[in-house]
Image: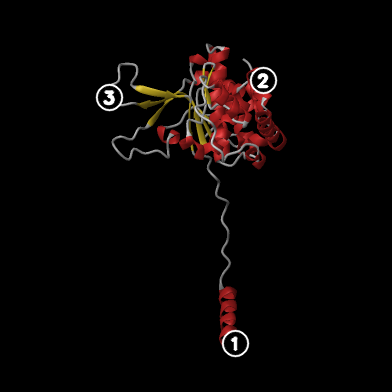
């Protein structure tokens, strides 16, 4: 075995010593995915898009294809529904950039934006719609969406004349929807995380007393004392995520979703009555302080912002 090993080593040395050096050719340029500026948006907008790309490596695009928009989705069966994007008028590009800055980007520190805080592609669209199928009355054939998340890309609708006519309340409502979607994107892609301490406050074993609704205030009060918040609102009417024992296995993700809604979109005034409950305040403060200390993001500045 020793002789075989020595022969193999000699053979390898002869092989490498006989091999001629190969000259390395000129470096191959890396082609960028998109060429900036894209087109006939105002110069101010094109300059801003180039600045965003140079600073954060993210493309803010107003010219793209349906394939760019929905490259992961395919119609596998006749019942599959494909979302369609409608490009915006380039004249509104700067208005759209200002809108995204007002409701999202200005709240993020620079280092976070550089480390995946902005997706690789941000597509700006007039609208995102989905054909509902035959049989709907005229004008109701489509469902419309404010955003679409696909991989490392987010498309935002609204790049049109409505940007200049949006009321303060309408802008806040849009912001709340979009910020919620962005935070889910951050969590799903592990750009943000949740501290373990959040899940150590409430009891996720014992079933709450139900039903939990306005007709049963004692049950609602007991639910709050355990540190649980509503999951959504219709106007001023709150809806709870606990509807019965069948919903309890999802208590942890439902609890987190309800807190993300409140820390990101409910003002200090709207939170005042909830924060009177010690466990609610404890969990609320855990998340607020964690995002501020670890990521330098003031989520309460987002929720309290007015326009």
Q: Residue at the location (57% across, 77% down)?
A: 12
State which quarter of the image contains the N terminus. Answer: bottom right
- Please tell me the numbered disc located at residue 165: none
166 on left or right of 142: right
Mark 3 neighbour density, 10 Å: few (under 14) some (14–19) many (20 or more)? few
Looking at the image, tell me whether mark 3 or mark 2 is earlier in sequence order.
3
Which element is circle 3 on? loop
Horizontal and vertical percent position of residue 150: 47, 36
Residue placed under numbered mark 1 in the picture = 2
| In this rendering, position of residue 175 left or right of residue 78 | right
User: Residue drawn 65% across and 28% down?
Assistant: 299
Q: Residue at x 56, y 72 (%)?
A: 19
Q: Nearer the viewer, residue 53 or 189?
A: 189
The residue pinned by badge 3 equals 134
Q: Tell which circle, 1 or 2, labels the residue nearer the N-terminal end.
A: 1
Q: Tell me how far mark 1 sits from mark 2, CA to CA.
A: 81 Å
Q: Nearer the viewer, residue 252 or 111?
A: 252
Taking depth in this image into account, of 250 and 243 the one nearest to the observer is 243
Label 3 vs label 1, nearer the camera: 3
Do the numbered discs 1 and 2 sit on residues whose CB atoms are within 8 Å? no
On the question of residue 137 being in view, the answer is yes
Callout 1: helix, strand or loop?
A: helix
Q: In the picture, residue 118 is in which quadrant?
A: top right
CA–CA distance in space, label 3 to label 1: 80 Å
Residue that carries the numbered disc 2 in the rendered image:
272
In the picture, which quadrant includes the C terminus?
A: top right
User: Where's residue 244, x and y in %?
Assistant: 47, 33
User: Among all residues in the image, which is located at the extreme left?
Assistant: 135
Distance, label 3 to label 2, CA atoms, is 47 Å
Residue 125, percent across and down?
47, 25
């Amino acid at each position: 075995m020793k002789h075989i090993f020595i022969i193999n080593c000699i053979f390898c040395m002869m092989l490498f010593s006989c091999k001629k050096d190969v000259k390395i050719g000129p470096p191959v340029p890396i082609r960028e995915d998109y060429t900036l500026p894209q087109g006939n948006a105002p110069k101010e907008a094109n300059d801003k898009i180039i600045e965003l790309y140079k600073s954060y490596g993210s493309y803010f695009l107003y010219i793209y294809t349906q394939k760019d928009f929905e490259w992961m989705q395919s119609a596998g069966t006749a019942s599959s529904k494909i979302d369609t994007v409608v490009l915006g008028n380039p004249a509104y590009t700067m208005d759209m950039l200002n809108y995204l800055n007002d409701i999202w980007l200005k709240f993020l520190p620079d280092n976070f934006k550089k480390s995946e805080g902005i997706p690789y592609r941000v597509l700006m669209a007039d609208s995102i719609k989905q054909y509902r199928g035959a049989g709907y009355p005229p004008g109701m054939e489509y469902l419309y969406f404010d955003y679409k998340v696909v991989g490392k890309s987010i498309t935002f609708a609204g790049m049109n004349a409505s940007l200049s006519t949006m009321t303060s309340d309408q802008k806040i409502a849009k912001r709340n929807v979009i910020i919620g979607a962005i935070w889910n994107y951050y969590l799903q892609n592990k750009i943000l995380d949740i501290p373990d301490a959040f899940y150590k406050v409430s009891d996720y074993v014992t079933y709450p007393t139900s039903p939990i609704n306005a007709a049963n205030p004692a049950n609602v009060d007991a639910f709050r004392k355990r540190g649980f918040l509503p999951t959504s609102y219709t106007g001023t009417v709150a809806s709870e995520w606990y509807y019965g024992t069948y919903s309890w296995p999802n208590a942890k993700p439902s609890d987190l979703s309800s807190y993300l809604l409140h820390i990101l979109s409910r003002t200090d005034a709207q939170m005042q009555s909830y924060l009177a409950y010690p466990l609610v305040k404890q969990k609320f403060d855990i998340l607020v302080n964690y995002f501020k200390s670890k990521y330098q993001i003031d989520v309460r500045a987002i929720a309290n912002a007015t326009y």
